Image (cartoon, rainbow, N blue to C red):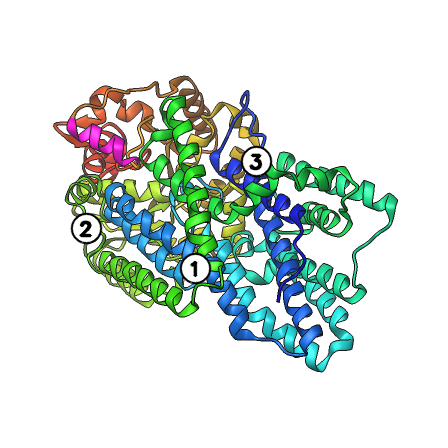
Amino acid sequence: MKINYRPEIDGLRAIAVGVVILYHAEIYIFGYQPFKGGFIGVDIFLVISGYLITSIILKELNETGTFSYKYFYERRIRRIIPALTVVMLASLPFAWLYLLPSELIDYSKSILFSLGFNSNFYFYFSGLEYGTPDGLLKPFLHTWSLSVEEQYYILFPIILLITFKYFKKHLFSILTVGILTSLFIADWGSKNYPSFNFYILPTRAWELGIGSLLAYFEISNKRREQNIFLGKTLPFLGLLLIIHSVVFFDDNMLHPSLFTLSPIFGVCFIIWFSNKDEIIYKILSSKLFVGIGLISYSLYLWHYPIFAFARIAEYPQGEAIVRIFIIMSLIILSISSYYFVERPARNRIYDFRKIFIILISGISILITVNIFSIVNKGKLHKSNTEIESKLASPLHESECKFSTDNVNFMYDKIFNQKINNCKKEYNNFILILGDSHSIDLFNSVANFTKKIFIVGLNRGRCRPWNNSTEERISKGQCHYQNALEFIKNNNNNLKYIIFTHRGSYFLTNGKDLPIYKKQFEETVDYITKLNKIVRVIYIGPTIEPNIDLRSLRTAREVFSGNYMKYKDLNNDNIIKVDKKLNETFTNLGIKYISKIEKINFNLKSDYLINGKVTYSDKHHWSQFGETYFGEKLINNSILKDLLN
């Protein structure tokens, strides 16, 4: 069922996709990121989707008294699947060329979950936080929002049809209650489960629902608001609210939450009050905005994998001409995708059965290739497989030297049985505690000594001061609370706790130094609690060379011996942090071991030794590095006596 075309809504789509792309492009102007709130473009899309889909369904119900699921889902398939399939197929050779085996497995899983419109759950349960540097390297992270919309398209028509048929008089009340309930859950979730809250339909349903409510009012009243004064002022206010959100929102805000009402109201003001006589309508209805809006879906699909592969290949670090090439490629591919994929697929002169057969063929190729990739552990490219083997850092494990990243290890029967068995043989043990960098240390120590019982409680990205980490700790996603309980339960058998994490590196960044004191006090509080129970050694700070082996281009150059882009380690800031750490922990009676002093890292001599790299990415040690740096750290400190 067609609804009246509104060009200003295509203009809104242009704004939505534009701010999302600018946000993901990470554009800085004089050190400031003007589009740091560009993620709200997705929220704009959701309101528009709710408005348009509800308008289609209610108009059909009002005019015919029935609703065709077949026609509805045929339209959704024609609209969404063809372009998505083409983009995924086009990404396959780049994934094969640029992704290491472990990354290729993750890529393949994300493709499969995206095809099933469940990628929002996949990315959440894989521990990926939206907006982080790691997320920018995932070619199909952006499909989480498509999954949310498709889940909505499956559930909402059923709910709306039942409500219309049996509770038509209460449709407004039911929509309102649903919106308020979803908004309450979102606001609560943003404070308690921020990552889960970001990805799921129940916390996004209120945005779609507000669009639905606008459609309900319009169809019930057979018109939108026609007040002249409001029609001239509120669309302008709406645009200001959207711009304000793009400029002043950032990744640290609670979202979606009550704060998100600001841009959502902005979208509603434009949808409900815009008219041909006011300036915002004329701007959004211009050829430029409408044109961008028409290709907005293709722009959204293409931009993220293009940016991701460009980052993986290190192209954004090149000259301006390379950046221009990337933007031009995005525009050309999006326009081509719109005219040669989207429009033909949506044109009803083409029989849906033929389109469906073509789609099934493309999807079958995607499923087959990606399952093959997973089954073969991502080892499809010989050179990439060899590079990853050189960068690998497998977890050391022997009879009484074992580590776990299980946050619920207190209830892990196998883990606790190992502890009890080894206590009988060794009585005392050493605990290595921290984030992923404590795994590096665990491997170093475990490889160095043979006759000591060592336990590692390690969990990537879990640091005791970071706000997001504090939320993860309090909600059981980090291991610190259980670690404290474990220490108390094993106090009589614990000889030492060796504690380390990446956190100290964040303080070497000049912009983070002003908040150093607050963060550090939280760390000291945490360490002090441990110190009351058992003797503690703290090792830091993290040393991070300015070479990132997550870039396959860099890795290939390093292993070929052609990489000469050595950069300064920013030693002044690292040394300041090192001195402050030493001073603070010494005052607390905690032994501090300086990595800077004991390892004495030299970028040119210690990064690549006899063709072997000492790092596996930008800040973690490789298996060779764990031995090389570990021996330096241990032999030059009190650890040598402790471990003998």
What amino acid type is highlighted by mark number 3? Lys
Picture coordinates of residue 7, whole percent (x, y) = 65, 47
Give the left or right position of residue 261, taking residue 544 as reference: right
Residue 118 image-quadrant placement: bottom left
Residue identified by numbered label 2: 379
Quick one: 93 or 52, which is closer to the camera? 52
What amino acid type is highlighted by mark number 2? Lys
Specify the principal SS of the magenta part.
helix
In space, the residues marked 3 and 1 are separated at their CA atoms by 30 Å
Quadrant of the rendering where the N terminus is positioned: bottom right
Q: Which residues are magenta?
A: 551-560
Q: Circle 3 — which element?
A: loop
Residue identified by numbered label 3: 36
Q: Circle 2 — which element?
A: loop
In space, the residues marked 3 and 2 are separated at their CA atoms by 37 Å
- Residue at 31% x, 23% y is 597
Q: Which mark is residue 81?
A: 1
Q: Earlier in the sequence, mark 1 or mark 2?
A: 1
Residue 386 image-quadrant placement: top left
In space, the residues marked 1 and 2 are separated at their CA atoms by 29 Å
Mark 2 Cα shell of 10 Å, populated few (<14), some (14-19), many (≥20): many
Asked whether disc 1 touches disc 2, contact meaning CB atoms under 8 Å apart, the reply is no
Asked whether disc 3 touches disc 1, contact meaning CB atoms under 8 Å apart, the reply is no
- Residue at 52% x, 35% y is 22
Q: Is residue 644 above or below residue 84?
A: above
Mark 3 Cα shell of 10 Å, populated few (<14), some (14-19), many (≥20): many
What amino acid type is highlighted by mark number 1? Ile
